[in-house]
Amino acid sequence: MGHRIIFATGNEGKMKEIRLLLEDLGLPVLSMKEAGAFPEIVEDGRTFGENAEIKARAVWNCTGDIVLADDSGLVVDYIDGEPGIYSARYMGEDTSYEIKNRNIIERLEGARGSERSARFVCNIAAVLPDGRVLHTEETLEGLIAHRPAGTGGFGYDPILYLPEFGMTSAEITMEQKNKISHRGKALKAMAKALREVLKGEMERTEDENTNCQ
Ligand code: IMP
């Protein structure tokens, strides 16, 4: 079939995770850099799905391979879904997460119990060689903590309290987080969807070969 899978990211941590999940597909999994694709990407979508697809399609336009991209963020219900797709840019790209996290907690002053509901969302888009696109989207549900806690993880992890653990997402271990995370679950679902596409493609090729005999 000669396919390659390219993940549109410069983040080595994400590459490790995706290589592990996709290794049984038996296809090479490359980063954008390894594939030599450096398109200019303008993330101007209105949803996580649109942004993931914009990134995947920009690389696909250069290579035509199976191209995957993800987009994720924190959605806080009490403040109308903010910071959402603007999670990385919230209060400015260079503002520390200590400040961003404190600001979100302040904006939830007065919110009690389930009014503090929030989630990490991750959408993965895969553009296939024929231009079709697949999406998977998963969440990690929690509540905005009353104060930041924990030193693990990154970004908004210290303020997403996970009731089933009695801890924030920055206090659980990396193994625990990988198992339940929005990204881990969306990647697993995408690995399954790709397995099905490739299996269908293999079966079609076998049928065509049988017809030739
Ligand atoms: P990206 O789409 O993976 O680059 O994520 C966008 C932003 O969402 C990050 O910069 C973080 O602010 C936030 N974010 C996404 N996933 C997580 C997570 O697992 N923990 C904490 N913050 C996250």
Image (tube, rainbow, N blue to C red):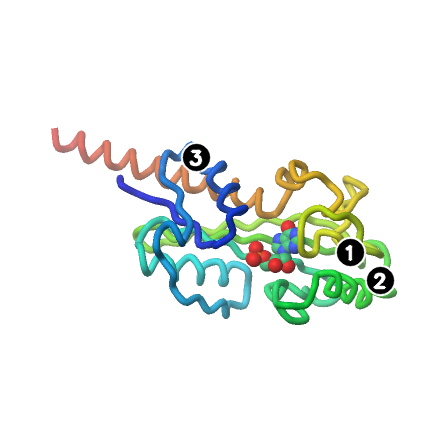
What is the x, y in percent for residue 185?
Answer: 57, 42
Q: Where ligand 1 lies, by quadrant?
A: bottom right
Q: The C terminus lies in which quarter of the figure?
A: top left
What residue would you read off at disc 1?
Answer: 144
Do the CB atoms of the residues marked 1 and 3 lie less than 8 Å apart? no
Name the residue: 61% across, 47% down: 182
**Disc marking residue 23:** 3
Name the residue: 31% across, 51% down: 129
What is the x, y in percent for residue 52?
Answer: 49, 58
What's under tag 2, amino acid-wise?
Ala
| 51 to the left or right of 28 | right
What is the x, y in percent for residue 29?
Answer: 40, 43
Q: Which of marks 1 and 3 is in front?
A: 3
Q: Distance between the residues labelled 1 and 3?
A: 36 Å
Do the CB atoms of the residues marked 2 and 1 lie less than 8 Å apart? yes
Query: Is residue 120 shown to the viewer in this render?
Result: no
What is the x, y in percent for residue 99?
Answer: 75, 65
Circle 1 residues within 10 Å: few <14, some 14–19, many ≥20: many
| 108 to the left or right of 44 | right
**Disc marking residue 39:** none
Circle 2 residues within 10 Å: few <14, some 14–19, many ≥20: some
Q: How far apart are marks 2 and 3 (CA)?
A: 44 Å
Q: Which is nearer the N-term, disc 2 or disc 3? A: 3
Report helix, strand or loop for mark 2.
Answer: loop
State whether residue 162 is above or below residue 43: above
Do the CB atoms of the residues marked 2 and 3 lie less than 8 Å apart? no
Q: Which is nearer the N-term, disc 1 or disc 3? A: 3
What's under tag 3, amino acid-wise?
Glu
Name the residue: 38% across, 61% down: 38
Which of the 4 image quarters holds residue 102?
bottom right
Q: Which is nearer the N-term, disc 2 or disc 1? A: 2
Report helix, strand or loop for mark 3.
Answer: helix
